[in-house]
Image (cartoon, rainbow, N blue to C red):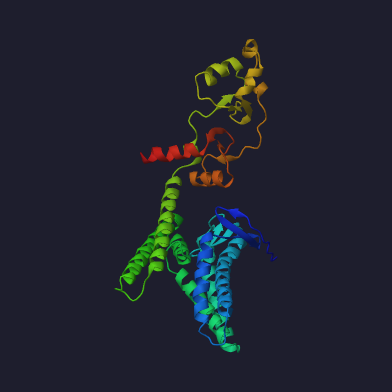
Amino acid sequence: MLSLSLGGQFMNNNIRVGSLFGIPFYVNPSWFLILGLVTLSYGQDLARFPQLSGGTPWILGLITALLLFASVVAHELGHSLVALAQGIEVKSITLFLFGGLASLEKESNTPWQAFAVAIAGPAVSLVLFLGLTIVGTQIPLPVPGQAIIGLLGMINLALALFNLIPGLPLDGGNVLKSIVWQITGNQNKGILIASRVGQGFGWLAIAIGSLGILNILPIGSFWTILIGWFLLQNAGSSARNAQVKDQMEAFTAQDAVIPNSPIIPAGLNIREFANDYVIGKTPWRRFLVIGADNQLLGVLATEDIKHVPTSDWPHVTVDSLMQYPQQMVTVNANQSLFEVAQLLDQQKLSELLVVQPSGEVVGLLEKASIIKCLQTSAA
C-alpha cells in the first residue's frame, strides 16, 4: 500500500518529510544546499531557450532538481523493496549532499541475497534511463521538455554507472562484497576487500580533483575531491567495522561474561549472603538466585534484606525474599560475541543473561565486559 504522510520531525539533524511503503524519509540540511545549486545550474541552462522567459526557467530548474532527487529516491527504494522482500526492516531513507542512503536493520543472510539488494538500486536507475530515453525520443515534446527529459535520463545512467564502481560504500562495492563472500564463504573478507577497493577509488578521485584544480588534467574539480574524501572516509569505516566484527566472531558470549557475576545459590541464609557476597564486595544491586541444577529461580534485590531484622538473618533464606525474574533476555553461551553485541545495541539493553544450552546460568554480560574481553585479547 502506497502512503505519504507529511511532517516536520527532526532526527539526528535530519528532517522527516514523510514515509513511503512504511519507510520513513528524511532529508539532511546539506540537501537544501545541493538542491539550490542544482536549481541554479539547471535554471541557467534553461534560460537559454527563447521559449522560456521571466521566472519560468528557474521554476523548471527547481522541478528538474526535484525530479533528479526523485530518481535518487527511486534508486534507494530499489534497494529497500528487495530488502523488505527478504524480511529486512528498512529503518529510513535519507537524502543528503552526495545523494541518498537506505538504512537497513541488518545484512542479508546469504551472498546472493546481498547481491540482489545491492544491484537493485542501479537496476532501477537503468530502467529509468531507458524509460526516459524512450519518452524523449518517441513522444513529441517542446524543446525545453526534451532537454529536461534527456538530462534526467543521462543523470540516471550516470547514477547507475557511478554506483557500480566496485568499492564500498557504493553499490558496486556491495556487489563485490557479495561475490567475495560467495567465493570465500567469509562475509568479513568481502567487506574488507570491497573497502580497500573503495579507499583506492577515494584516493584516485582526490588525486584527479587536485590535478584538475591545478589544470594539469582536463577533468576533476573540488567536487571530485569531496566525493573522493567521502569514499575514503566511508570505506575506511567499513574496513574498521569488518575488522572489529572479525575479532568479535572469534569469541562467544561465555568469553565476555562478567567475572564473579552476581549469582547466589538458593538456600543461602541472609547472614551468609551478606558476609560472602555483600560486605566488602562489588556493590551489586541485585543477585541471580539459582537452584541445585544451576537454573535461574529468581532475583534478589540487595535492598530487600534491609526489611528483615538482623537477628533473623541466620534463619531467613535468600529464596524466600527473591522475586520471580521479569522477562530477562538470555543468550546461548556459545553464541557469537558479535551477534550478542548486535542484540544489546538493537534492543537497547544494559545486560544479558548468558546460559548454557541446557539452561544452566553462566553469568551476566554487558557492553563494558565485551570491551574488556576484546581489550584483554588485544593486549
Q: Residue furthest left?
A: 216
Residue 103 x/y as whole percent: 55, 58
How many numbered markers are drawn?
Answer: 0
Q: Nearer the viewer, residue 236 or 155?
A: 155
Q: Is residue 231 visible?
A: yes
Q: Quadrant of residue 292?
A: top right
The residue furthest top is 311
Instruction: Compare residues 206 and 366 and report the one nearer the observer.
Output: 206
Q: Nearer the viewer, residue 127 or 69?
A: 69
Point out residue 50 in the picture as x, y percentages from the top left corner.
54, 87
What quarter of the picture does the C terminus occupy?
top left
In the image, 22 versus 147, the foreground residue is 147
Image quarter where the N terminus lies is bottom right
Q: Relative to residue 207, is residue 142 drawn left or right?
A: right
Residue 242, image x, y percentages: 43, 53
- Measured along the vertical axis of the image, is residue 197 above or below residue 58? above
Q: In the picture, residue 132 is in which quadrant?
A: bottom right
Q: Is residue 65 above or below residue 334?
A: below
User: Does residue 100 appear anywhere in the picture?
Assistant: no
**Residue 83 % position (x, y):** 58, 61
- Horizontally, is 96 left or right of 324 in the view? left
Q: Is residue 356 above or below residue 166?
A: above
Up-down: is 22 above or below 37?
above
Image side of residue 205 versus residue 129, left or right: left
The residue under the point 52% across, 39% down is 333
